[in-house]
Amino acid sequence: MKKIVLSLAVVFTLLRCNSVKNVNTSSVSQAATLLSSLSSNSTVQQIASLFSLLDTNNDEAICTSEAIGSVADNFNVLDTDNSSTLNLTELTGILNLLK
């Protein structure tokens, strides 16, 4: 329940943020739902789906403005190459954080 409330709060905050424009709110909502359901038993396919939903500009990378929830909270830990973006391989590191 706590994860759902937090996810909804993140979505609400994103919707109110003036710097977030042309974002598909359905994708953000789906990403928040998927993120809240992840566990250490989640699959790479689920992470790939999350990556696609978060990569709102389709540049094959997630920047800090696209990250939400625990991805945003752990962005610097996940960004192992210090590029200020996350690729799919780096995002799969979220599974290790869920253990």
Image (spheres, helix red, strand yellow):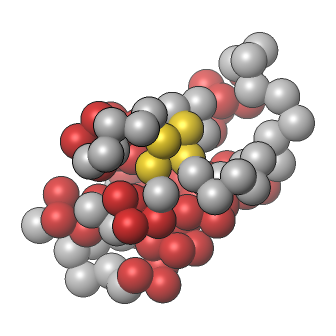
Residue 25 lies, in percent from the top left, at 78, 46
User: Could you say which quadrant of the image residue 1 lies in?
Assistant: bottom left
> Could you tell me which residue is drawn at 55 percent across and 38 percent down?
63
Indicate left or right for 64 with 77 as reference.
right
User: Could you say which quadrant of the image residue 39 lies in?
Assistant: bottom left
Q: Is residue 67 visible?
A: no
For the C terminus, the quadrant is bottom left
> Could you tell me which residue is drawn at 24 percent across and 83 percent down?
41
Number of numbered discs present? 0
> Could you tell me which residue is drawn at 25 percent across and 68 percent down?
95
Q: Foreground: 97 or 32?
A: 97
Residue 27 lies, in percent from the top left, at 73, 57
> Could you tell me which residue is drawn at 54 percent across and 65 percent down?
50
Q: Is residue 83 visible?
A: yes
Q: Residue furthest left?
A: 99
Q: Foreground: 61 or 7?
A: 61
User: Relative to 25, does residue 46 appear above or below in the rendering?
Assistant: below
Q: Foreground: 42 or 64?
A: 64
Residue 3 lies, in percent from the top left, at 37, 51
Q: Residue furthest top?
A: 18
User: Relative to 48, does residue 76 appear above or below in the rendering?
Assistant: above
